[in-house]
Image: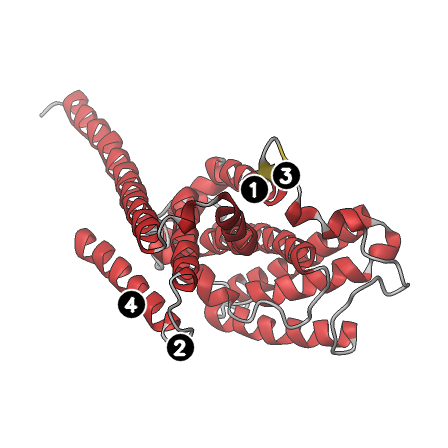
């Protein structure tokens, strides 16, 4: 074979590999879309049509906006081959920081909460990259520390006003009840976060994260600053999580130092149902959102048809295990 023919063969294989990778993500998206449609159909039938009532759909959105935002953040970390157990504690810390700093104005309070989230992400990233702790251990430790700091900040209770006495604005309290052009405000919030996250993942940094999740050593050998990009991923994800904390405060109208205890597990479940590999390097953020919606609709439907809270976690667990099992069987 000539040199030119050999180069042509190599070049023809590279787009094919890229197409296979893209097709895998597209196939996962189609699969989770089909599961979501099936869940909607089952929810509609079993609830006698109640599920599709506008009031109920708005309720599903209100209850799960924070989880959608956090799942997007968790997906970014899982994409690198890690996991972030501190998402719940960041939500708690961001909520109390936002409410506690309302004396400086809502804009300043929001900025303080998001910057605090970014700093926590920086700490997590450095523990993983520099100290070389497993992400599970690093974020588990930061989770415990952040919960303690949040309790110290509030004195152990919830915050219903700024530390200087500034009340929570009525417009902020009404955020989850307002709509624009018939679309609830929370929808605009997570759509904005989705756009920002999607742009981030479509940038060169996002492509590096996919590569890091697939083969971090190869990325380093290629001269790409894998460690720096990994740290930036933790910073970006925790900043998004802090936005989720502010949304949580808007939903409940207070800051809670103990909020989000179960959120890490729910976000991991959503990412898994969305078809992303927990080993990293595979998945899409849209499929992750669909994963959240599947969990949300399942929870809502079980409540509508009166399934006992005792059995609800077991049913949800079975659905999660079966879904991930089907993904693994298809990939093997």
Mark 3 or mark 2, earlier in chain: 3
Instruction: Return the residue found at the far right.
Output: 164
Q: Comparing marks 3 and 4, which lies closer to the viewer? A: 3
Q: Which mark is residue 179?
A: 3
User: Which residue is nearer to you in this view: 189 or 207?
Assistant: 189
Q: Comparing marks 1 and 2, which lies closer to the viewer? A: 2
For disc 3, the neighbor class at 10 Å (few under 14, some 14 to 19, many from 20) is: some
Q: Which residue is mark 4?
A: 318
Q: Is residue 46 something one can see in this rendering?
A: yes
> Relative to 150, does residue 62 appear above or below in the rendering?
above
User: Which residue is nearer to you in this view: 285 or 33?
Assistant: 33
Residue occupying the point 60% across, 45% down: 186
For numbered disc 2, what is the local secondary structure? loop
Q: Comparing marks 2 and 4, which lies closer to the viewer? A: 2
Residue occupying the point 78% across, 72% down: 153
Q: CA distance from mark 1 to mark 4?
A: 29 Å
Residue occupying the point 57% across, 66% down: 88
Q: CA distance from mark 3 to mark 1?
A: 9 Å
> Relative to 140, does residue 119 appear above or below in the rendering?
above
> Relative to 19, does residue 137 appear above or below in the rendering?
below
Relative image position of residue 64 (x, y in whole percent): 52, 54
Relative image position of residue 159 (x, y in whole percent): 77, 67
Q: Which mark is residue 310?
A: 2
For numbered disc 3, what is the local secondary structure? strand
Q: Which mark is residue 187?
A: 1
For numbered disc 4, what is the local secondary structure? helix
Quadrant, the N terminus: top left
User: Which residue is nearer to you in this view: 142 or 35?
Assistant: 35
């Amino acid at each position: 074979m000539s040199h030119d023919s050999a180069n042509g063969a190599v070049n023809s294989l590279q787009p094919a590999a890229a197409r296979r990778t893209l097709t895998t993500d597209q196939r996962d998206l189609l699969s989770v879309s089909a599961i979501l449609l099936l869940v909607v159909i089952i929810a509609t039938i079993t609830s006698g049509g109640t599920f599709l009532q506008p009031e109920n759909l708005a309720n599903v959105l209100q209850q799960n906006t924070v989880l959608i935002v956090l799942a997007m953040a968790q997906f970014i970390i899982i994409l690198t081959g890690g996991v972030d157990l501190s998402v719940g504690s960041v939500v708690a810390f961001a909520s109390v920081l936002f409410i506690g700093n309302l004396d400086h104005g809502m804009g300043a309070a929001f900025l303080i909460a998001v910057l605090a989230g970014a700093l926590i992400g920086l700490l997590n990233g450095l523990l993983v990259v520099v100290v070389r702790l497993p992400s599970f251990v690093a974020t588990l430790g930061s989770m415990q520390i952040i919960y303690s700091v949040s309790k110290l900040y509030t004195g152990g209770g919830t915050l219903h006003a700024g530390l200087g006495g500034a009340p929570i604005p009525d417009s902020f309290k009404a955020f989850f009840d307002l709509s624009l052009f018939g679309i609830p405000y929370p929808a605009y919030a997570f759509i904005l976060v989705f756009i920002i996250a999607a742009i981030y993942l479509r940038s060169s940094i996002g492509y590096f994260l996919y590569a890091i999740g697939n083969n971090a050593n190869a990325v380093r050998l290629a001269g790409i600053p894998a460690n720096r990009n990994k740290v930036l991923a933790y910073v970006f994800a925790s900043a998004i999580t802090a936005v989720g904390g502010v949304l949580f405060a808007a939903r409940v109208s207070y800051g809670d130092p103990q909020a989000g205890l179960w959120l890490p597990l729910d976000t991991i479940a959503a990412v898994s149902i969305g078809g992303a590999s927990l080993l990293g390097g595979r998945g899409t953020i849209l499929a992750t959102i669909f994963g959240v919606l599947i969990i949300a609709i399942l929870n809502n439907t079980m409540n509508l048809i009166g399934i006992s809270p005792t059995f609800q976690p077991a049913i949800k667990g079975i659905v999660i295990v079966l879904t991930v099992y089907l993904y693994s069987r298809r990939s093997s």
